[in-house]
Image (cartoon, rainbow, N blue to C red):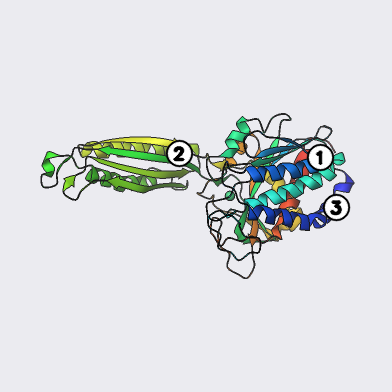
Amino acid sequence: MTKEMTQEEIRSRIAEYREWMIGVRRHLHRCPETGDEEYETTAYIESLLKEMGIRTEKLLDTGVLGILDAEDRGGKCVALRADIDALPVQEETDLSFRSQRDGFMHACGHDMHMAALLCTAKILSDLRGFLTAPVKFIFQPAEETDGGAERMIRAGCLENPRADYVLGYHVAPEYPAGTIAVKYGYTHASSDMFDIEVVGVKSHGAYPDEGIDAIVAASQIVTAVQSIVSRNIVSTDPCVITIGKFHAGSAGNVIADKAEMSGTMRTTTPQTRKVAMQRLKETAEGVAQAMGARAFVRYRPGYIAQKNDDSVMDVVMETAEECIGKENIFIKEYPSMGVEDFAFYSRERPSAFFFVGTGYRGRKNYGIHHGKFEADESALDIAVLMEIMTCLKLMSSGTDS
Ligand code: NI
């Protein structure tokens, strides 16, 4: 890293572009688009990247990859990621720039992610003469739906040039603007959906002995499954099994021959995931058999668990201490049992994912996905500073300078 690219230099450039960045954020906030529908969003991002002289590649129908070509002087190539999709949530704020699309809102703050990454791209583009490797900007669709990250990777976003590291973050209204939150190891759970079909024999409700009651069998399964977390899973390892859907029966005086249930399983470690999946299947099948019925369990794997690389996290921590001071860093103790498709980048490359506080001090902050969710835009400065400074440190980790 050269002398010209000190933290002060980056800070002054952020200040210079602050109004522009807020304008970009508000424009995006007005026009939310959900997963794989982000056509206007993509076109807007692409046009801004091109204005900056950054090469773009459309790897999927929506979402775009920006490549800042810099002379390869032995540095490491860092990929910075922002997700771009909004949610089918009705906005309930009074903001002057609130959503112009009824029933849709950037309620997860991805508009903040995009605006900050565009500002990061703008500053790095200005300073490209000082870079020792190319930088990649991944504007990825469909984080909220089916995992656009995995499709972007399959389409080659980490190749040509090969990204050595990936960096990402999420806004966090539960932490005040001016702070960040970090966690080593697992930050988010894996998610597996499952369906259980219980098959019995139909009969008249007055003669249960002539049938096999699928409702009674399925109810026993719901109860028995509760013991998996408490009796089969290592108690220090998080695991959630929820059956959130239960449908059975057609009439009050008929013994149901079928019951259908669906649920979600959240785990972090592969061992716990394996044990939980196996025990759920065995429990459902075994309990059904004991009741004379049959159970069929089907899994639909979702996102994998998101795990940070220790050495990249060390760089994030060092950067955060230099940029905002130790007193403004929260260390998260536990992973979220929610999901984050950044996990797919972490599986491919040493990566780190952290949280940027966007809460307002001294007033109630609604959580992400809420119609009243708002983000303190002063946090954008910190997001950009963290992205740039961490990127530069990772980049120079490959050189002697
Ligand atoms: Ni999100």
In this view, the mark in front (2 or 3):
3
Q: Residue 401's x, y, as percent?
A: 85, 38
> Could you classify mark 2 by the number of other residues whose Cα lies within 10 Å: few (under 14), some (14-19), or many (20 or more)?
many
Q: Residue 86's x, y, as percent?
A: 58, 50
Disc marking residue 67: none
Q: How many marks?
A: 3
Q: Residue 334's x, y, as percent?
A: 54, 52
Query: Does residue 89 lie above or below 399 as drawn?
Result: below
Q: CA distance from mark 2 to mark 3?
A: 47 Å
Residue, disc 1? 53
In this view, the mark in front (3 or 1):
1
Q: Residue at x 63, y 64 (%)?
A: 95
Disc marking residue 273: 2
> Could you classify mark 3 by the number of other residues whose Cα lies within 10 Å: few (under 14), some (14-19), or many (20 or more)?
few
Residue 132 appears in which quarter of the rendering? top right
For numbered disc 2, what is the local secondary structure?
helix
Disc marking residue 9: 3
N-term-proximal mark, 2 vs 3: 3
For numbered disc 1, what is the local secondary structure?
loop
Q: Residue at x 49, y 39 (%)?
A: 302
In this view, the mark in front (1 or 2):
1
N-term-proximal mark, 3 vs 1: 3
Q: CA distance from mark 1 to mark 2?
A: 45 Å
| 103 or 57: nearer the viewer | 103
N-term-proximal mark, 1 vs 2: 1
For residue 229, say whether it is visible.
yes
